[in-house]
Image (cartoon, rainbow, N blue to C red):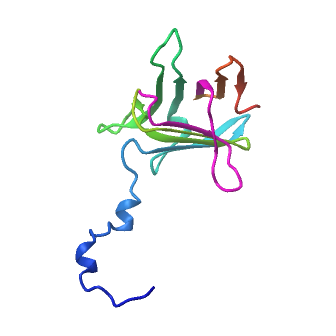
Amino acid sequence: MFSKPNPNWKAAQPPRPKAADVARIQGGGLVQIVITSVSPLNYYLFLNDRAVPQEDVESLTISIDAPAPENPTGGIYATLAYRALQVTGEKAMQRVALFPCTIEIVGLGRRISVTAMHANSLEGLWVTLGLKPDGTGAELTGLRALRVLITDGIVDAKLTWEDGETEDILPQ
């Protein structure tokens, strides 16, 4: 079980990356929305580790469509429209395509998590709902479409199953 230390052990192993480097948010990153009230609508939005004030957000939209006869390839997109500070010191509307990234929406005792590894592709897409006691979400299968809209005074999240039934994810 135990033996003499091999003096060449460290030389044979590749160097371990620094934990702080591994912990970096890479790619499109992480979008987090925490809804604290629906009437009036109040939420906090973070783009990676930067807060975007609610008053600067015009909208956040997510649209996922599974392949169907009318759309054989399906499709995904997520867009954040917000007023961003420009070099002039003024704010101007900016639209950002969010995928590839992970988007997590928490509110009304619910959780929606969407991870897209590729922009405009269903490959590497995971949608999970809720949060189980073990810390995992319920991974969805049989999903035909997912629509999320957060805009001035409106939060709407609807899921359509393969059988055509549509449900509100964030009932109000």
Q: Position of residue 135 (x, y in %)?
A: 64, 54
Q: Position of residue 125 (x, y in %)?
A: 49, 35
- Which residue is at the front of the view, 90 or 135? 135
Name, please, the residue furthest toward the front. Answer: 1
On screen, 39 above or below 167? below
Give the residue displayed 47% in from the left and 26% down from the top: 76
On screen, 120 above or below 102? above
Name, please, the residue furthest toward the right. Answer: 172
- Which residue is at the front of the view, 145 or 153? 145
Quadrant holding the N terminus = bottom left
Give the residue displayed 41% in from the left and 60% down from the top: 23
- Which residue is at the front of the view, 54 or 101? 101
Provide the residue span drawn in magenta: 121-148
Figure disc tally: 0
Quadrant holding the C terminus = top right
Q: Position of residue 16 (x, y in %)?
A: 32, 69
Q: Is residue 70 left or right of residue 4?
A: right
Give the residue displayed 38% in from the left and 60% down from the top: 22
- Which residue is at the front of the view, 21 or 164? 164
* Magenta highlight on residue 40: no
Q: Is residue 134 left or right of residue 68?
A: right
Q: Can see residue 35? A: no
Q: Can see residue 85? A: yes
Quarter occupied by residue 24: bottom left
Q: Position of residue 128 (x, y in %)?
A: 61, 40
* Magenta highlight on residue 124: yes
Q: Is residue 12 left or right of residue 18?
A: left
On screen, 117 above or below 71? below
